[in-house]
Image: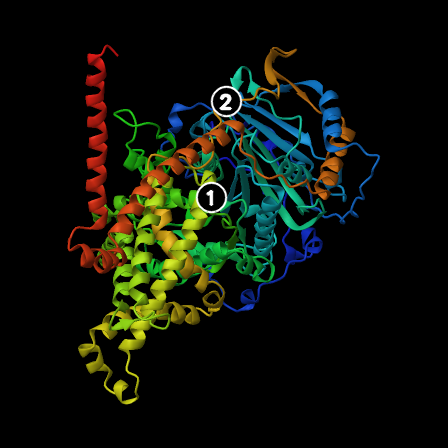
Amino acid sequence: MAYHQQHNDPYYTGYGGNNNNYAHSTFPHADTGAGVGNAYSYDMHPADHAQGNDWETKSYQSYADSQAHLNPQYEMSQVSVPPVPNMPYAQQQNYPPTFQQRPPLRPDPGSPGWSSAREKLMKRRSVKQVELQKGNLVIDVPVPSHIVPRNGGVSDEMSNMRYTAATCDPDDFMRQKYSLRPYLYGRKTEIFIVMTMYNEDEVLFVKTMNAVIKNIAHLCGRNRSKTWGADGWQKVVVCVVSDGRNKVNKRTLQVLTLMGCYQEGIAKDSVAGKDVTAHIFEYTTNVVVTDNGEVSTGACPIQVIFCLKEQNKKKLNSHRWFFNAFGPLIQPNICVLLDVGTKPTGTSIYELWKCFDRNSNVGGACGEIAVDTGRGCSLLLTSPLAASQNFEYKMSNILDKPLESVFGYISVLPGAFSAYRYRALQNSPNGKGPLASYFKGETMHGGGPNGAGLFERNMYLAEDRILCFEIVTKKHEAWLLRYVKSAKAVTDVPTTIPEFISQRRRWLNGSLFAAVHSTVFMLRIWTSGQNFFRKIILQIEFLYNMVQLFFTWTSLANFYLAFFFLVSSATSPNSDAFNFLSKGAGAKIFEVILKLYIALLFVVTVCSLGNRPQGSKWTYAIAIFLFGICNVITLWCAGFTVYLAVPHTVDGWKNIGTLIQTNATFRDIVISLVATYGLYFIGSILYFEPWHMFTSFVQYMFYLPSYVNILMMYAMCNLHDVTWGTKGDNGSSKDLGGAKKVKGEDGKDMIEVEIPTQREDVDSLWTASRNALRYKPVEEKEHRDAATKQADHDRNSRTNVVLTWVGSNMALIIIFTSEAFLDWAQEHVESTSGTTFNPYLTFLFWALAGISAVRFFGSTMYLFLRLFGH
């Protein structure tokens, strides 16, 4: 597969130059019986055996078929670029090679640890002069010998790793003449996968990476496909973007080291005086690593780009590296977004791609996000919070996503697992479009005339919702969004209350303001390229979303009013749901539970205004429990009301129409409950997924009041907090050493770098990384630093004082205005004294009179004593 220059190529200068020297390997197909065909055995998908199965040829003139459709904003006439650098990837007949799995290494007590091996490697580095490639530092270094294929004739692609020190902003990556291996090979990339991570450990990283490898192996196993097959891995590029060099988990780096996608001692923090913004490592790996350091041969090679950002600049910046820096060079057809920790099932990526391939107007798609319930659904049994989220996720995938998919507009394609057509994301020539709107949130700091307001900054907390809206309403284009039920990915959910509240704060604020944005600008659908019928359908959906927005905004009042009317109607003297306790018990229970509900709202409001969830976790835990008790009582009252409303004889059910017309209670309560919870059961059964109704429904109902009263309250009280939950790192460590520009012997500009040159040092560090992963580190509990701990303590103390002060005052109001006290006063005080005054009011009058008398006595005594000179 040779690299061919094209006239629209950003590196084309009009002459062949060194391009003839840039040869590439020719890869035989598996069905030829030669080379890789005998080396790899793929499982053929049953669907590919069908005759005439040519639907995969219906792709929408894939941009992966051409390198000519680069960023339209990039003016070629403004740049004079030399030809592609000569990278001697020799032509090989037996490529990609295979090698036998090495036996697992046994821990050697006498071998140096990872730190010792790294220190030795760093000390034994040598100074080398490297020629700049188009003014940029690009180094090809050998990978550890443990992962180099054994059967000779290996191309540099699997024997060398390529390191690029990027010193520019992501938007300038191509303008600064940086390049990537897949582009230099001239490969047509069908799927470009990005895995974003912050400080996730090796367990989460391996879970996602190995799932991606299995998905790519599945693509290679579709031997009857016209797009995929044995060489399908060449059409897939996996990009791992880590947010901050000082934030990345060291054990995750050790996994990447074992894969050959990262090496210590190579990266530099500056090049010719310019600060490095990202360290880019490229390698085609055929290694599968487990979280305990076991290494095995993969089913197929994987093209990996590991982008280690120097600074922590948040997830949006990571996506900007993916879309704006690497995308214009890779020119993929489909972009798949994954968060490290999310595990797509074995064929999920293929199922997403198939949706785009079958429907040329699909601009974005998502699969089902499911909760990782652990082995044997153990998490559902041990964590009610996780179970409630499992129910929430399941019902969203059964009721919400399919509905939106039918309309053609899905309000949010989750960034943890979604896919977009690269062409649909591109901006218009004037610089406006989906990607421009998507990345607008990255630069929003402060308010006033030079910054965005609070509304806009909260809106861009849900940047994925903005992206979906921009794609569907894109001017003069007709893109739709789809939900792919067969594509599934599992992810971890918060299992602690503080983590849960913090996560939902960003989700709720972002989704609320993004929904307002889409409602206000819903008429933009009429300037899109959708056909008239689709515009009508989408307009109906926007109106439906507007109704949903109204109920979201009023959810606090709606939930309280439902609680109030259901409980009050079931505790009246004529229909007391608690008569089994004692006569008239319902009225007393209603009064207590009503006051408790209001008090809980007050406590949650005070905590939300001033405290972090981590500092008030016990307060929130108690509030969640008590709200759950309130909901249990509400459900009991609702059930009792239903029991009274339904006929108790067979004859009473004969004329159901008359029953609905004449019995208002039956009509309002029974039908609404059946339409809600009954449809939950029916929908789950229709999708053949009823199990969450038995394992998670009860937990969800217990947590339901907290979703409204606690999560919404905390979110609204913290609108000013527009962070993504991680602290930014705006400085560089400067601990890697710089690359200095010097003059070579022939007068050319050279870069002087210090890199490892001893093969045994690289191999030793690889072995040490493998051994280090075999031993799990001692789990350390997260500890707050002293300043944070003191701040949390001070906020908590303040909250306790406020709650004590207001609570004691509220207690007086509640006690002396309660019906129980008034009845007691009427029976024991008014009947004996003949007064109609509340006894507490009488107490207040006499107390105030006594205090005034004491003050007057003191005043007169002062005058009396003054007469005698005292």
Q: Which residue was labeled with disc 1?
A: 617
Viewer-side residue, 486 vs 393: 393
Is residue 362 rendered to the left or right of residue 336? left
The picture places residue 110, in percent across and down from the top left corner, at 84, 34
> Is residue 62 visible to the viewer in this orientation of the structure?
no
Name the mark nearer the viewer: 2 or 1: 1
**Could you tell me the amino acid type at mark 2?**
Gly
Judged from the image, the secondary structure of the residue bearing numbered disc 2 is loop
- Marks 2 and 1 sit apart, C-alpha to C-alpha, by 33 Å
Q: In the image as oriented, which residue stretches furthest toward the right?
A: 110
Judged from the image, the secondary structure of the residue bearing numbered disc 1 is helix
The picture places residue 101, in percent across and down from the top left corner, at 76, 49
Crowd tier of the residue under label 2, counting other residues whose Cα lies within 10 Å: few below 14, some 14–19, many 20 or above: few
Q: Which residue was labeled with disc 2?
A: 731
**Marks 2 and 1: CB-CB under 8 Å?**
no
Crowd tier of the residue under label 1, counting other residues whose Cα lies within 10 Å: few below 14, some 14–19, many 20 or above: some
